[in-house]
Amino acid sequence: MPVKIISWNINSVRLRIEQVMRVLDEEQPDLLCLQETKCLEAQFPQNPFNGRGYTHSALTCQKGYHGVAILSRLPFASVDRFRFGGKEDARHIAVTMAEGPAEGVTLHNFYVPAGGDIPDPEANPKFAHKLAYLDEIGTWTGGRSPERAILVGDLNVAPLPDDVWSHRQMLGVVSHTPAETERMLSIQNLGWVDTVRKRMPEPERVFTWWSYRSPNWEASNRGRRLDHIWTSRDIEGAATDVRIRKDVRSWERPSDHVPLVASFSF
């Protein structure tokens, strides 16, 4: 039986709870991974999820900023939280599944720092923090390849030339600079498979984020692929379907990110 996972930077779960419920009703996933929930755990709107059967939750929260959550219809065997980049930001949560077809699979949900506007770690502490965060993820597994693992989230890096609307013009823009893309590809080389690009190989342009600053985002289509779903190599064949819900960006008061939907048969 397939297991369906959705990953979505919601940019405030309380502000967009109706949109979240609409996606859940339309897609009926087994697990939902949210980034940028922007609320404390006591403020998290758990009741609407409980009413739809998502009674298992793992949260790490921070007042007004960051925050990641995993909501599930399937039970967890364990929950882990890691801190990267030398700060106590709420940017990572992981669960290991307890039973069913995904038993023993560990799901990591990340929100990597955006890094500010200036791609210079000496002039911009936010960019320095982002690079440190990526460096630490690169040493996180101790050089060992991950096993039976899925990594999702807003990684805030568009690593490939066709992950942005213009590779040449974006090389000096935070999210697509060589300092970031080289680090992300090094992390992938530890043993992760990019399921989106496996299904939608280059040179197809694939985006998951469109700026609020564009008055007509769809016509200009100046997007970036900042959101990702990876698997460890030992289960890469389990990914049976990967989709990007671009239509959600047109909903009323949308997040600037759209949901990624992936199904797995283990």
Image (spheres, rainbow, N blue to C red):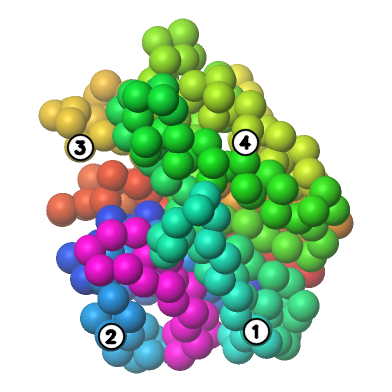
Helix, strand, or loop for circle 3?
loop
Q: Amino acid at mark 1?
A: Ser
The residue most toward the top is 168
Q: Tell me the distance, in whole angstroms, between the alpha carbons under discs 3 and 2.
A: 29 Å
Question: Of discs 3 and 2, which sits in the foreground?
Answer: 2
Q: Kindly identify which residue carries mark 4.
A: 184
Q: Amino acid at mark 3?
A: Tyr
Do labels 1 and 4 touch, CB within 8 Å? no
Q: Kindly identify which residue carries mark 3.
A: 212
Helix, strand, or loop for circle 1?
strand
209 to the left or right of 14: right
The range drawn in magenta is: 54-73
Which mark is first along the chain, 1 or 3? 1
* Along the viewing direction, whichever of 195 and 243 lies nearer the viewer: 195
Q: Kindly identify which residue carries mark 2.
A: 42
Q: Kindly identify which residue carries mark 1.
A: 78
8 to the left or right of 200: left
Which mark is first along the chain, 4 or 1? 1
Q: Is residue 262 magenta?
A: no
Which mark is first along the chain, 2 or 1? 2
Dot 1, crowdedness within 10 Å: few (<14), some or many (≥20)?
few
Q: Amino acid at mark 2?
A: Ala
Which mark is first along the chain, 2 or 3? 2
Q: Amino acid at mark 4?
A: Met
Q: For residue 36, what is the image quadrant? A: bottom left
